[in-house]
Amino acid sequence: MLEKKEHDRVRKQILEWVPENIIDAHVHAVAKAGNVPPEKSKPHPISYRLFRNTTSMAYPDIFNPVFPNSKIEMIGFPLPLPFKEINPKQWNNRLMIKEMKKGIHGVLYGLNNITELNKTLKIAKKHSLIFHGIKFHPRMVPEKRREEVLLKEMVQEKTLDFIEKNNLAMILELSHGYNEDDIKFVNMIGENYNIRTVIPHLGFNYWGFVMRYDDYKKSLEGSTEWFEKELKKIKDCKNIYFDASMVIDKRAVQAALNMFGDTKVMYGTDYPFGFSPKIIENRPDNDTLAKDLKAIMNKRMKNPWRYYYNIYLQVLAVINAETSLKLDIKEKIMNKNAKRIYRI
């Protein structure tokens, strides 16, 4: 079990390193998930915004800030809930607009309905707001088809035209891990469109671009060279970028920096868990997590520092990669890259 003294030790190291300005490039906005009860939206029971600082989170008087000496901006993604659990039009036109008014940099729920997307942009403009991206996620596809759906079915040509015209970043995740047809589709986008394609989690979660579900466990034991070998699958794709959300392993961060350079990787958190034996050991089961986060919403959580710890481990992975590579990447990874990629 995680001890408070270990958390405090890591926290001290992190706070001495982080810059004054941070952009979290992967946060799930709208804390109540469209009023979907936490128990029904597993494994993502509540917005991660609950764990952020006092300036931009839904419940500002619950926690001490995670990074008390830094100004934090957030790129807010829609929760990847299926259509049956949430109305995507309502999400874009009401919920995201509401969050953007609080200072979140908004990302659209991925639709191929151009009329609705244009309507959302007009609503945002009316409030002097702009969207910075659009996200397509396999959880948005009905579960019975999820394993077989290809990117070219999720993102239509007319939608690519819309994304390019409005200078949006496009965030893509896969339902089945690496697939040659999907990589060809991403290559086609890079060859024919001026679109910035963002791959979350450095491509290494179990829905990631560079591995299949069966390879997910293997990644926990992989060397830096193993991660580089996997990333070579997408090395030739043009105009692709990465966020390092959920990643607490310096080997994955280091491999991405070696392969793609330090201008294409962004800091991000997603939910407060990464992938490693250490995180799996400390992570509560889904029922406990749902209850904990519900307690947070009701201001009854006594030890929120346990959730902060995993945020710090994600930053620590970047610090350790920086040290190994003898680079000065703090400002780029934690701020400047996201500002450029998302046109903030």
Image: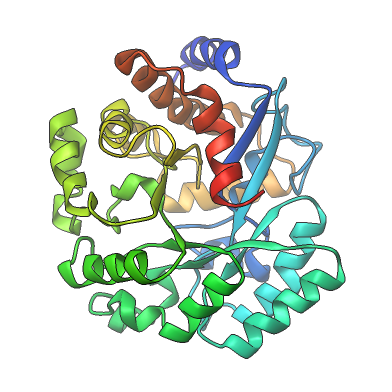
**In-image side of 336 versus 157 (left or right):** right
Q: Quadrant of the N terminus?
A: top left
Would you identify the image quadrant in which residue 72 lies?
top right
**In-image side of 268 versus 226 (left or right):** right
Would you identify the image quadrant in which residue 168 lies?
bottom right
Residue in front for this viewpoint, 231 or 70: 231
- Name the colouring of the figure: rainbow
**In-image side of 259 versus 128 (left or right):** left
- Callout count: 0
Q: Residue at x 46, y 23 (%)?
A: 329
Give percent across and percent down for residue 319: 43, 19
Give percent across and percent down for residue 153: 34, 83
- Residue 331 visible? The answer is yes
**In-image side of 157 versus 236 (left or right):** right
For this orientation, the residue located farthest to the right is: 127
Q: Is 326 situated above or below 303?
A: above
Q: Residue at x 38, y 19 (%)?
A: 322
Q: Is 42 situated above or below 111?
A: above
- Residue 306 visible? The answer is no
Residue in front for this viewpoint, 115 or 291: 115
Would you identify the image quadrant in which residue 166 lies?
bottom right
Q: Is 10 situated above or below 336?
A: above
Residue in front for this viewpoint, 281 or 249: 249
Q: Residue at x 28, y 34 (%)?
A: 252
Residue in front for this viewpoint, 107 or 89: 107
Q: Residue at x 50, y 71 (%)?
A: 81
Give percent across and percent down for residue 73: 69, 41
Give percent across and percent down for residue 180: 16, 67
